């Protein structure tokens, strides 16, 4: 009895250890890629270097598009461990892993131990969730804290929660909302509140307001979220209008950021992103929609509204990116997990069969990725990627077949574990494959050639464009020339930080004893035609690095 009782915890600890190893395996290996990874690595780098933890700056220029929680966390990681790829990606990786552990607890609390395990496995192996957890962007941190807020509400209101548990979990929910606001803005509180209001409207249970601890919870929310907004507004009076109007109302209702997509944009992303649980998710959702609603508080209805509302909310937005629907994945994982606790082995085997077919198709199609080659991404880079893609496809194929065999024999739990770890490993291999393309999407390789020419305090110009990964790799800012883009607002308030036109750049360049610049091939040719003195350092199809030529000693 004692051996059997101890085997399950030991098995869980072993799974956790293996998951951590696979989860963290490629955080350092991959070079930072355009554009988010460079941007969200550089802002905290400058923050840690300058010591200003109030005003975010991109390339040394005021940048108010997002709140600072991830910047703070990453800057702290830089300060403690150093500036590496893995420290740049540490926050999304940690919050992503914690999100899976949170679903383990919530699923076990609401639906039983197996549901908790399955929820963690499903979430931690879904393609989109795993991928975004290993890319340096803000959406994983937002997803974790939204999940904390919404599951806090679930655990506070579920029928077995006593007064102490209700108060505890509602305060967790309020804190989650505050940290979500500090992660990505007002949607951190708007989305959870709207889901709760929709639940009360659908359920016609308006007495839930009594259990929300509005006063103490609201004060906790304000205590966590407001101080930075006050501090940054005092230091930068221009902040409130830009952040609250431009970055929230205008971004959502218009296509100002050039991210317009059709209303159905997220449908294929969801279908691919939920793999390898695609068929099971359809089965779970259909059964959940058909089942009778519970008389009291209904956690499953809450999960449906959570996933459904957020999906619709971003689908009708004027600004869309694939990662925006990430916050629905924890709810979907719980819904799928509940279905997995009752599914028959043979039913699950049939649901995993399409995954094996897709893996086989990927194995066959991998060599054809070379047809995506272009002038900016040469064919040899895609050729280097093919072995990684083959490894990913083989992993998914073997894992799905192994899970089908276990499931067919009635070992559903083993099947879920095998499929989940295969999905996680497949996503990691696919992500790692992208590093083969890094010469096109990162400045890392060119910077290695540039390093012998870098000197402290030497003027460095970025002409006609801005390479997001460059400041992180050269550990300094560059002076923009004839380019503003997302830094336009900051440059409007600090115009001394840039050179507005090429003529001004030429005058400055000719006056320097030593200076560096990066530009595109077209501008490089234009400068050559203007007979601007330049010495080539390194170049590829998209970028040209130059320096001022050595001055000739004047003899007499």
Image: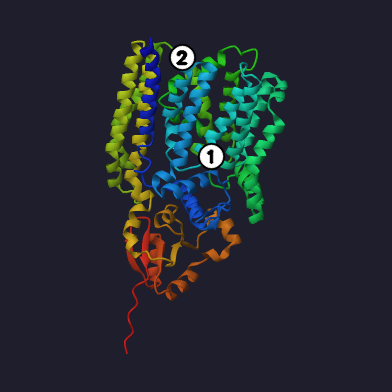
Q: Position of residue 53 (x, y in %)?
A: 55, 52
Helix, strand or loop status at disc 2: loop
- Viewer-closest of 222 and 551: 222
Q: Which residue is pictured at 58% across the width and 38% down the height? A: 179
Q: Quadrant of residue 225?
A: top right
83, above or below 410, in the image: below
Residue 134: x and y in percent read: 42, 38
Residue 479 vertical position relative to residue 284 in the rendered view, above or below: below
**Is there any visible trace of residue 459 in the rendered image?**
yes
List the residue tagged with mark 1: 320
Q: Is residue 219 left or right of residue 51?
A: right
Q: Which residue is mark 2?
A: 341
* Crowding at mark 2 (Cα within 10 Å: few <14, some 14-19, many 20+): some
Question: Does residue 398 appear to the left or right of 6 in the view shown?
Answer: left
Mark before the other along the chain sequence, 1 or 2: 1
Disc 1, SS: loop
Q: Which quarter of the image is occupied by the C terminus?
A: bottom left
In 3D space, how far apart are the residues under numbered discs 1 and 2 (Cα atoms)? 35 Å
Residue 147 falls left or right of residue 126: right
Indicate the position of residue 453 as horizontal and vertical percent values: 34, 65
Image location (x, y in percent) of residue 541: 34, 55
- Quadrant for the N terminus in the image: top left
Of labels 1 and 2, the one closer to you: 2
């Amino acid at each position: 009895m004692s051996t059997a009782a101890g085997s399950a915890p030991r098995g869980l600890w072993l799974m956790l250890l293996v998951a951590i190893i696979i989860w963290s395996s490629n955080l350092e290996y991959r070079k930072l890629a355009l554009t988010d990874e460079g941007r969200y690595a550089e802002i905290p780098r400058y923050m840690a270097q300058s010591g200003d933890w109030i005003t975010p700056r991109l390339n040394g220029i005021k940048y108010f598009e997002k709140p600072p929680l991830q910047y703070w966390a990453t800057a702290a990681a830089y300060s403690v461990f150093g500036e590496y790829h893995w420290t740049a990606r540490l926050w999304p990786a940690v919050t992503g892993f914690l999100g899976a552990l949170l679903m383990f607890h919530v699923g076990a609390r609401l639906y039983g131990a197996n549901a908790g395990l399955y929820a963690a496995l499903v979430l931690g192996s879904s393609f989109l969730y795993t991928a975004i957890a290993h890319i340096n962007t803000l959406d994983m941190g937002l997803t974790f804290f939204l999940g904390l807020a919404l599951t806090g509400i679930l655990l506070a209101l579920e029928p077995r929660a006593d007064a102490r548990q209700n108060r505890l979990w509602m305060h967790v929910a309020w804190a989650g909302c505050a940290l979500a606001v500090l992660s990505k803005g007002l949607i951190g509180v708007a989305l959870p509140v709207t889901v709760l209001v929709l639940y009360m409207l659908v359920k016609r249970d308006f007495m839930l307001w009594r259990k929300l601890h509005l006063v103490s919870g609201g004060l906790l929310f304000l205590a966590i979220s407001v101080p930075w907004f006050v501090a940054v507004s005092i230091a930068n009076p221009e902040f409130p209008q830009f952040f609250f109007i431009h970055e929230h109302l205008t971004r959502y209702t218009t296509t100002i950021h050039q991210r317009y997509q059709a209303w159905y944009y997220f449908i294929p992303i969801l279908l691919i992103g939920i793999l390898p649980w695609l068929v099971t998710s359809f089965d779970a959702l259909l059964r959940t929609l058909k089942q009778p609603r519970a008389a009291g508080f209904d956690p499953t209805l809450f999960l449906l509204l959570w996933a459904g509302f957020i999906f619709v909310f971003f689908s009708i937005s004027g600004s869309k990116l694939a990662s925006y629907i990430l916050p629905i994945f924890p709810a979907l994982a719980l819904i799928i997990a509940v279905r997995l606790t009752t599914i028959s082995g043979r039913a699950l085997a049939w649901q995993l069969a399409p995954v094996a077919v897709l893996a086989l198709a990927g194995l066959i199609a991998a060599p054809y990725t070379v047809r995506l080659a272009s002038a900016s991404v040469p064919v040899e880079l895609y050729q280097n990627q093919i072995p990684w893609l083959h490894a990913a496809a083989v992993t998914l194929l073997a894992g799905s077949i192994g899970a089908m065999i276990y499931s067919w024999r009635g070992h559903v739990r083993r099947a879920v574990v095998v499929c989940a770890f295969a999905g996680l490993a497949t996503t990691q291999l696919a992500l790692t494959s992208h590093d083969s393309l890094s010469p096109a999407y990162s400045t890392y390789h060119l910077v290695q050639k540039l390093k012998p020419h870098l000197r402290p305090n030497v003027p460095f110009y970025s002409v006609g464009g801005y390479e997001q990964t460059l400041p992180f790799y050269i550990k300094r800012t560059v002076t923009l020339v004839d380019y503003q883009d997302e830094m336009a607002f900051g440059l409007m308030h600090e115009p001394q930080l840039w050179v507005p036109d090429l003529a001004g750049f030429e005058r400055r360049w000719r006056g320097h004893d030593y200076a560096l610049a990066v530009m595109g091939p077209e501008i490089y040719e234009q400068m050559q035609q203007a007979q601007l003195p330049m010495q080539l350092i390194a170049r590829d199809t998209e970028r040209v690095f130059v320096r001022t030529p050595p001055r000739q000693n004047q003899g007499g």
